[in-house]
Amino acid sequence: PGKTTSDKFEGSFENEGYTKTEDDDVDTNSQLSDHPGGIEVGDGGPGLVEAVAVDPESDDEYIPAAVEFDPDDKGKSVVYLKDSRTRKYGIAAVCILVALVVGLSVGLTRTNVEVEVTDSPSMTPSAAPTSVLFSEVSNFIITSFEGLMDDMDSLLDDDTSPQAQALDWLFTVDTFFGSDNGRQLLENIDENRLLQRYVLAVFAFATESKFWSFCGFPTDNTGLCLVDLFDPSQGSIIEEVSSHWLSQNDECSWFGVTCFEDGSSKNVQQIFMGKFQVLISESYIEATISSLFKSIVLICQWLLHFPIVDYFSTEDNDIAGTFPVEFALLPELALLDIPGNRLSGTLPPEISEFRSLEELRIPNNEMTGELPDELFDLGSLVTLTIGGNDFSGTLSTKIGQLTGLLGLFIFDTLMDGPIPSEIGELRFLNGLFLENSPFSGTLPTEIGKLTQLTTFHNSNTIITGEIPNEIGNLENLEILIIPGSRYSGPLPPNFYNLDRLTDFFANDIQNNDTAPVTTGLSGTISADISKMTNLQIFLIHGNSFTGELPDEFGDLPNLDFVFLNFNSFNGTAPFCDSVSPLLKRVGEYQLEMDCLDSDSAPALVECSCCDVCCDDSRELCLNNQP
């Protein structure tokens, strides 16, 4: 899954898959030179990756990525209703179909990865250890857990506890450290390594690894299993050799475990427990496919509520249990990533003991409760991803203590209340997801302090009020996604200063059904939109905009998707002129406006080049092209 500590930031550090271009004139090295984590970035610019940290210069690092899609295969008819859910599910089905076709079309290759395997491993118990040695190891473990789990002595006395089962496995099954009547003497064993192996074993027993979908309890004496990864350099999926948990092999070869080796010591640095087959990677998309497919991918991801870069096809490993507090005893652990499983319970206050943790990712599990204050004591955190859980309560004002954060991803939760103004203290933040959760209040003006922000998702909340004018201070913003929230009022004047913005989703904001009701965004589109030359996606359907569209809108050179329907625009669309950049790319854009006659009146807008024409009074859209 990639590197985690300072070396992972060399080169371009992917921002949820979004990379800077050669034309960027921002000195990102100087901007991040004082990051509290000592992070350095290359000419590619700052950013972050949600699923894996990727070094784009590395030829031997396997990352999942997207594959090419044929944008010319367009349907011949379009009929849909205004209801966003109907449209969303339909397009989601198309996205899933595309993913399935892509997956089936990719050829499989195999690579061999060296794995340290002990001589003649055996799954049968070794000779019983002496009671003196067992007592010494038990006391060592109890001492190691002091302050973290003070009831370890009683847990070790309970034969059914994961802690006791792990100790029994270490003595009666495991042969990794060799044997002397079943075991080497304690003084001849690296105590840190012994504790590390024990801690991992506790996790395996606590989550019943024998029931994992893959790479759990070993099924044969080799202890090996295969993991699918996508190799973009070969354009194919490879099967990488890994080891089952609780196998006799080096624990650093167990699935998802990566160790840092320093001389004779090997310390666990990363634990990544997600298996995936396809991951949308912006750097790979830009190198291989058209901008239209990129736009399709973004729209599909929004409709399916996926972060811009996240697990597009993640296989659930069926890991069940509570948050593994025992991992706090892994002193070098910098990345803990357990996505898409069945972790439950609360995030414990012992999270503060994870002193080296830089990236905490536990999305799409079954966790509950409020975030403990101790979470905000982790000053080394760079990425925090807790979406897809039933966390509740408010986002603490202590969020401002995590000054080294590059990415904060809270989505699909029960968290509510206002976004604290302290969010403005996260001045290195690149990616911010606060969506699909009942956050309320207004968007704080301090959002304008996040000048490094490139991606902001704030959709499907109950945040009200106008978009603050300070949004225009986000000079690096490329993605702004706010559909389904309860904003109102015009686009602020400084909005048009976002000259790096490529994707703007502000659709379906008008809401008359549930409180708080809103007419959505309103006012006119300013001629200053001419400054937004990088715009590719502009979706504002389902609002209360009025007036004629400025001619400058039609001159933007990079538009791919423009949805302006279900508003109150009038006049002639500025996109159909023979010199329009959009019109020159027939078949490579999607344009929708209210250009369909109603039962009693002509269409609000004249648009001969629109792909789809709509009538707001009937909440109906029809295909406008042969």
Image (cartoon, rainbow, N blue to C red):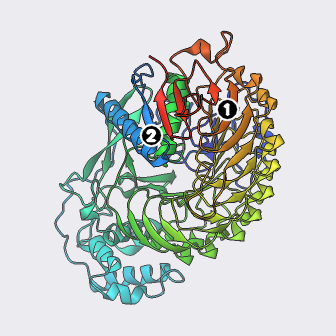
Left or right relative to 145: residue 581: right
Q: Nearer the viewer, residue 269 or 193?
A: 269
Quadrant in which residue 570 is drawn = top right
- Residue that carries the numbered disc 2 in the rendered image: 279
What amino acid does circle 1 point to? Answer: Lys
What amino acid does circle 2 point to? Answer: Leu
The answer for how far apart the CA atoms under marks 2 and 1 are is 19 Å
Left or right relative to 441: residue 101: left
Q: Which quadrant is home to the C terminus?
A: top left
Relative to 221, does residue 89 appear above or below in the rendering?
above
Do we see residue 111 in this rendering?
Answer: no
- Which secondary structure, mark 1? loop
Q: Nearer the viewer, residue 487 or 70?
A: 487
Q: Residue at x 49, y 34 (%)?
A: 621
Labelled disc at residue 20: 1
Q: Residue at x 50, y 70 (%)?
A: 329
Instruction: Tell me where residue 142 appears, x and y as whole percent.
Output: 44, 83
Q: Are marks 2 and 1 in contact (CB under 8 Å)?
A: no
- Specify few, some or many for label 1: CA neighbours under 10 Å numbering under 14, 14-19, or 20 or more: many
Quadrant in which residue 418 is drawn = bottom right
Instruction: Tell me where residue 521 appears, x and y as whole percent.
Output: 70, 47
Left or right relative to 564: residue 163: left
Instruction: Tell me where residue 204 appears, x and y as whole percent.
Output: 33, 66
Q: Residue at x 70, y 43 (%)?
A: 40
- Specify few, some or many for label 2: CA neighbours under 10 Å numbering under 14, 14-19, or 20 or more: many
Q: Nearer the viewer, residue 110 or 287?
A: 287
- Which secondary structure, mark 2? loop
* Most distant residue in the top direction: 578
Do we see residue 620 in this rendering?
Answer: yes
